[in-house]
Amino acid sequence: MKKKSSEKKRHVVAWVNKAEWDQVLEYLYSQDPGLQRYALQRISAWKGRYASSTPVAVECTADLVRCQALDRSGEMAGADLVLLYGMALVRFVNLITERQQGKIARPLRRLAGNLNIPEWVVDLRHDFTHRKLPTLKWCRKGCKVVLEWLQQEYWSRQLGGGSNEDWESQSDGEDEDDLKLKDDELIARQKEMETYKNVRELLISYEKEKFQAFDKLPGRKDKSLWPAPFAEMSWILGEIKQFSVESSDFLVDVLLEDGFLIPTVEQLQTLGCDMSDNVSPRLPQTFLRFWLPLLKMLNSPSFIHLLLEKLFVELKLLSKEENNHRAFYISAWITEILFCNSNKFEYHFETKAQRKARMKDRIFVNRIQLRWQQLLSACLEAPCFSTPHMLQLILDDMEHPLPLETRQRLVQLCSIYTQTEYSESDPSSEQKQQPVYTLESLHEKLQHSRRYSHLSLAEPDRGKSTQEHRWSDVQAEKAKLLRGSPWQVCVDKVLWKNYPLGKVPGQSDDPSCLMVGNYSTMTVFDQPVEMETTAPHSAPGAMAPVRTAGGVVWNHSDVGKLKSGLQLF
């Protein structure tokens, strides 16, 4: 058994002994052209003995050293040397990386990087094969670097004179799993980029078809009424539907880019949308109908859940940036989806015909079981100007709603945090119920009270008496609003902005002014003490000895002396 194992380890080589190997290696990397030619002759003899199994590194080294020897001899012109160097460098890159190529072709730069071959050497090879020939200077530099790499990676590793024919694939074999993982990641990334590109092209085609149909409409008044989809549009919608089944994440990501569900200013102008009324987060009707055919086709519950989730994520990212246009339309789409899902919301400001038309413009009609707790958390984590509005919609439409008082407090706290106003359909009743949190809230309540106070100004002859009457009514309203509050309205005309918090007019900067001027003292015995009903009754005049931590025992008279010496202010 030992004999067989030793026979398996034996390897036939082309050189006579290790001395010949060392001599050839020394002559190859010498600066003498004569010694290099001798080493090349010995390698030719080796190739005759090896036949077709000559190590790749030996062949590449011989080709590159031959170029150097001819260059130093001065027997060839510069253009001929460039071609000679080019052939040697191209063969080196191809032969060295050939064994790493698997069933799927991989980029030469990655394969060369795995072998620590400089990337610019691969670029030099690319220039030789596809572009303008490099200069002789770059050819010499590339030859020098490659010879150094061969000496380090091949010649210096041959111990005992044995040739390792699989040296090129050893480092790759050790990291075969890592390379396979990287290749899988690269393939997946390429598929993602291709999917993203295809989805974007389909959505652009959808927009082109819609804009062409919009331009063909006769009058501006009828531009909000879109025609039925054409054959081309039906094909585009079918392709987008297929992508929504296979790659819904990519579809939603592209839809939320600027120029799609988030319109540009040019798109809004083309559609004739009025951009002046941006108070409430509602979509312009023309813009909503622009995307309605696509969204009606994608109105599955899973897609609506994903769209809402992505919308809130985008809104949260915008909380640190100032992009009111994008935040407005993201909030408007969230509001539109919540309106479509709501059975409780009524359009009090619309006629029956408008309400019927609005029902036709819904993205979906049947109610969807939304993830209300996740929506509530996502809404609160993305504070913006429209958060109180969206929060009210979520709270009112939840399957298991919170108590009314809790909902009102949540909306009010959200309004204070976002520094925005939000009122329901009856603002007068809500203003009366809201407590006073800030000075701005007080001013708003005063303005509200003036608006609904119905103060008569029809008699101008009263003049001063009317103004005094209004002033007294305002003061009475202030006192009524602050009733039960520790705050009081200052009637003096003081510019409070000139005084820091905690300081009043006329107060000295000396801290001693806060000390009390007149005070009286009393002893501990004179201090009024409430009798404890739960204390155990004891005999009159009886008191247990008091023992301290140090073991000293105080009697009743000692404690009385201590108390008599204490005074209270």
Image: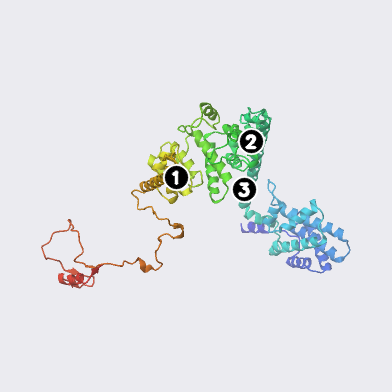
Residue 196 or residue 73, whichever sits in front: 196
Instruction: Tell me which amino acid carries mark 1.
Output: Gln
Q: Between marks 3 and 2, how big is the CA–CA gap? A: 43 Å
Q: Disc 3 designates what residue?
A: 185
> Residue at position x 57%, y 50% from top?
322
Closer mark to the observer between disc 1 and disc 3: 1
Considering depth in this image, is 165 or 381 the residue closer to the camera?
381
489 lies above or below 296:
below
Name the residue located 24 percent from the left edge and 68 percent from the top edge. Answer: 521
Q: Secondary structure at mark 3?
A: helix
Rounded to the nearest angstrom, the CA distance separating label 1 from label 3 is 63 Å
- Scheme of image coloration: rainbow
**The N terminus appears in which quarter of the rendering?**
bottom right
The image shows residue 149 at horizontal and vertical percentages of: 72, 62
Please rate how many residues cluster around mark 2, counting C-alpha atoms within 10 Å: few if below 14, some from 14 to 19, many from 20. some
**Amino acid at pointer 3:** Glu
Residue flagged by tag 2: what amino acid is it? Leu
Q: Residue at x 62, y 59 (%)?
A: 2
The label nearer to you, 3 versus 2, is 2
Q: Which residue is the site of mark 1?
A: 447
Q: Which residue is mark 2?
A: 271
Q: Residue at x 67, y 35 (%)?
A: 208
Q: Is residue 91 visible?
A: no
Question: Are there few (<14), some (14-19), or many (20+) residues within 10 Å of tag 3?
Answer: few
Residue 368 location, x and y as percent?
Answer: 49, 34
User: Is the C terminus in the top left, top right, bottom left or bottom right quadrant?
Assistant: bottom left
Q: Is residue 35 left or right of residue 184?
A: right
> Toward the viewer: 164 or 339?
339
